Image (cartoon, coloured by chain):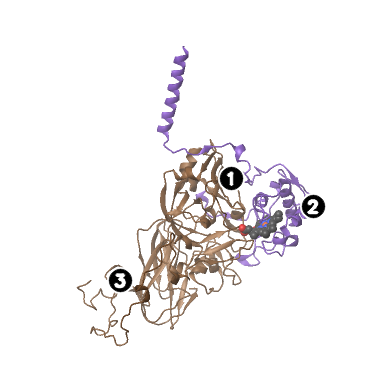
Amino acid sequence: MSMFRLLVAGLFVALAFDTATAIADDSPHLGKPISEVDIKRWDITVLPDGSNLPPGSGTAAQGAKLYVDKGCSLCHGENGKGGPNPTLVGNPSLTADGIASPKTIANFWAWPTTLFDYIRRAMPWHAPQTLSDDEVYALCAYLFAANNLIPVNEEMNAQTLPKVNMPNHDNFIIKFPDRI
Amino acid sequence: MSRRQRGDGPPLEFVAGNGLLHRRALLGGGIVFAGAFGSGAPLTGAAAEPLQEPEWSLMPGDVTPVLQKPSRFEANVVRTLSNPKGDARTQHARAPLQMLEGTITPNALHFTILHSGIPDIDPAQHVLVIHGMVKQPLEYSVDALLRYPMVTRKHFVECGGNSAPMFSPVPIQATVQALHGLSSCAEWTGVPLSTLLDEAGVDPKAIWLIAEGADSLAVSRSVPMKKAYDDAMIALYQNGERLMPGNGYPMRLLLPGYEGNMNIKFLRRLKAVDQPAMTYYESRNYSPLLPGGKAYKFYFVNEVKSFITRPSFGCSLSGPGFYEISGLAYSGTGRIDKVLVSADGGKSWGEAAIEGPVCPRAFTRFRMPWRWDGRPTVLTSRAWDESGAVQPLRADFIAARGEAKKVPNVLGFPNQHYNSLTSWGIDASGEIKHVYV
């Protein structure tokens, strides 16, 4: 086959393909393809099975120091109690004040991954996304240990954190199962 | 009308106790009460002043501004703020629903909740990314989305914690704005989310979509893919103009009928996944505690609700005679089908007039003509929607969902998703109190 004929055949295929997609799908297609690598900086969602937890680790001892150094204690109180913002340490009864009982990490939260996800994306409130992944693991270790959910010397990392047992885990009823 | 003599209107027809009139009285040629106009002889101006020209009629008015503001005489029609100084916590702005009419909340008065203030987003730099379990991750600029085929829909957005003061064991004396002001309704225009999901090519195993905002807390919620494909919209316009900054400029997720917090504002990322993320807000704030200590999760829908906005706490009746009872009804599960109103604390009910067109998952205005005889009375309303859902009576609601033991702060959130009745007690002097029936 001559070069010319090859070129023509190629052109024909390309044209046919273009027309076919245009007919099969009249969506505007104005989105720019992007790779997961380029989305990485934004992709901070951690799932309950632990997927998307970053490498790194931290301990309660490191976390206790960070808790003060990073200003957490200013808003959440020394040792996680008594500050102007939500209590982070404490396990009050979920029925003491009826349906208005305070919810805490220890008495209510169902998944340990929620803590990592939230601290990493949102805290400290005035300077979010300034903590390193090691620091977030350390703060999680500190808060889990202070709430007696892990032994004080257990290191938190991508393998150990999703396995932290949350006591209230099984106490949720799905309100609208048929909408999932 | 013009040929009709005074005293000649349709006959008075009462449909329920304490002076509730047939709704026809509103739709027809008006109501005439026997005796209301005296003997029929021309009224003389014994007490009236002769008309004068006011000063504004005698000189040219102000220069036309580029952006209109309400009259200075309406300066009290504003939102109420829970955190006016912007302390390091959530800011709530409640809509003055008792001072508004119709079904659209003006943009400047639309309720907002910001967990860390209003981000100042440059639309030229904002993008929306769709990724995760998709064939091709895509990035959309705001300009690109503005070129897409759009839809316009009227929908309410309501905070899942709206009406929380109603969990108080005794009625808190507060306005509709304080009790129910975390709810508003607008005409939203934007791109159906399904269009964009199809362009990215969602894996059928991805049954959840994690939505995230560009605010400093990157507020994030898990949305069932079912809803995303059903009627979700990337909203770009609110009542004809681009979104208000506090409502999510330059774009927000709109999930008609689903609790406000899920309608992620400043939307910048949608990740298709096979499990819910159990983000902070869905795991904690919007998982309402039940009596006994268990809790609901995935309480997506704001269920059928209604309340009378006029007359209501904060105003008083100026004496016996005719009043129009006016209120709002809406439901996250469809169109409002009917609203009943009672003027005797729920002993008897009459059907209110509903103004159409009635849109699904949108504010619906109901009206009821009423002749107050001057005796103490209790006004209340109850709504049904097209799915058959009915607003629960308070006793039934409290039996299922419980109430707070102590009177909560009116700005607090003892629990979420209250949709039972609201009642207004009126005493002989016309004073209005919030009461439970």
Q: Nearer the viewer's eye, disc 3 or disc 2? A: 2
Front: mark 1 or 2: 2
The vertical placement of B280 against A39, above or below, is: below
Label 1 Cα crowd, 10 Å radius (few <14 / some 14-19 / many 20+): some
Q: Position of residue B176 (x, y in %)?
A: 48, 69
Inspect the image, locate mark 1, and give the three-letter code of the amino acid beneath it: Gln
Residue B293 image-quadrant placement: bottom right
Numbered tag placed on residue B186 in the rendering: none
Q: Which chain is purple?
A: A
Can residue B256 be spotted in the picture?
A: yes
State the residue position of label 1.
Answer: B275
Q: Position of residue B408 (x, y in %)?
A: 59, 70
**Residue A61: which numbered mark, if any?**
2
Residue B95's spot in the image, x, y percent?
49, 65
Q: Report the front residue among B145 and B342.
A: B145
Which residue is identified by label 3?
B25
Q: Which chain is brown?
A: B
Q: Please give the name of the residue rendered at 73% of the width and 52% of the height, measured from the top-left corner.
A: A139
Secondary element type, mark 3:
helix
